[in-house]
Amino acid sequence: MIPTHPASAAAAAEPVASPVPDRSRAALRAILAMGVGSFAIGTGEFVIMGLLPEVAQDMGVTIPQAGHVISAYALGVVLGAPLLAVLAAGWPRRRLLIALMAVFALGNFASAVAPGYLSLNLLRFMAGLPHGTYFGVAALVAAAMAPPGRRAQAVGQVMLGLTLAVLIGVPLAAWLGQAVGWRAAFAFVGALAVVAAILVRREVPDLPASAGASPLRELGALRRKQVWLTLGIGAIGLGGMFSVFSYVKPTLMEVAGMPLSQIPIVLALFGAGMVLGNVVGPRLADRALMPTMGWLLVWSAVILAAYSVTAHHPWAASLNVMLVGTIVAMGPVLQIRLMDVAGDAQTLAAALNHSAFNTANAMGAWLGGVAVSAGLGWTSTGWVGALLAIAGLGVFALSVRADRR
């Protein structure tokens, strides 16, 4: 049986907003406003994947070279999350959220008018910088405003915008990009970010940074063993989802014999799975954080391993891909865990969760590609994913053992 972490229950009892009806409605409006920002970021992060041929043709490069634009954004996320979290440690929360969304909007508007390939890569890097810090700070604000025992659900509601982006925002922006041009898709994302900044200004309370917050204190999070273990669980354990999803299109077409016209349906199912996981996972985490984390890793290993079998059958594969999407439930769970173990370095730890998420993205896609290139077949990505989930479970076991000590 996976043990319950006693610190999680204690942390859930920390002072929160009063559950008076007016305050509850105000908290919901604030969370929805921040959720619009996560919707904008999610749309901006993933829409380029469906527009690579158009970008490549316009820029005069190959499609693989155009794919470097995706890597540039991910690098911006990984580097920007800790950098901005430390530099802006003393900023009031609302002002910081608005500033981060403004930088994101500017990066996307500038991407829409990028004159060349190099400048587009630099501007996508810039657009990725505020990504992790925005999600981290928004999670802190949502958790602070949540009623007792509902911190994970509040964080999940903010991150729901990210999952809805995969289901709704990305197809809409991709359609716009194909109909009008890929630059219009980035302009659309920039407009979403402006709307989010306005809503945050109107609805999010002007919460100050924690007393005594400073760059030096935030860096103290890096001295905490449990912070690194939690980040390791995310960076390794979540990699399996990306190992499968990165190659889902060629796998379903080559192995399951699925026609190209049905692939968008499967991608929509993946998005539906993400929404489901983002709703159910936080509810379970509010009841028992560490057991939920452990069982989610077990669940991940099982459904990723199953993909190597179901990928041969169109309907079974489609259902399996939806279940793979539920693995995203780990996001809010890990976010709350980082809040519990970061002590007084909350901002940096919360932001680093998305650095770990993007590390999982890069590592999962790379290892899946290695397996395919080695001649193991498209279905080998499922076994790679299962092994990554099991490795994440090993890091989880180390974290539980360290808690007991």
Image (spheres, grey):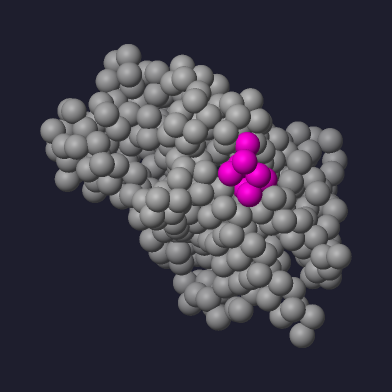
Percent across and percent down for residue 307 are 61, 42
Please state if 148 lies on the left or on the right of 348 as rendered. right
Percent across and percent down for residue 369 are 40, 50
Please state if 313 lies on the left or on the right of 63 as rendered. right
Task: Work out whether residue 290 or residue 326 is closer to the camera in this orientation and state it.
Answer: 326
As drawn, the residue found furthest toward the top would be 179
Is 357 above or below relative to 2? above
Residue 50 is one of the magenta-drawn residues:
no
Residue at 79% over, 80% down: 404
As drawn, the residue found furthest toward the front would be 375
Is 79 above or below relative to 193? below
Please state if 6 lies on the left or on the right of 99 as rendered. right
Residue at 27% over, 20% down: 181
Which residues, given as a range, are shown in magenta?
303-310
Residue at 79% over, 45% down: 283
Residue 305 is one of the magenta-drawn residues:
yes
Q: Main secondary structure of the magenta part?
A: helix
Percent across and percent down for residue 269 are 61, 28
Is 330 above or below relative to 343? above
As drawn, the residue found furthest toward the bottom would be 405
Task: Work out whether residue 327 or residue 216 is closer to the camera in this orientation and state it.
Answer: 327
Quarter of the image with the N terminus in it: bottom right
- Regarding residue 357, the answer to whether it shows in the image is no
Task: Work out whether residue 400 or residue 90 is closer to the camera in this orientation and state it.
Answer: 400
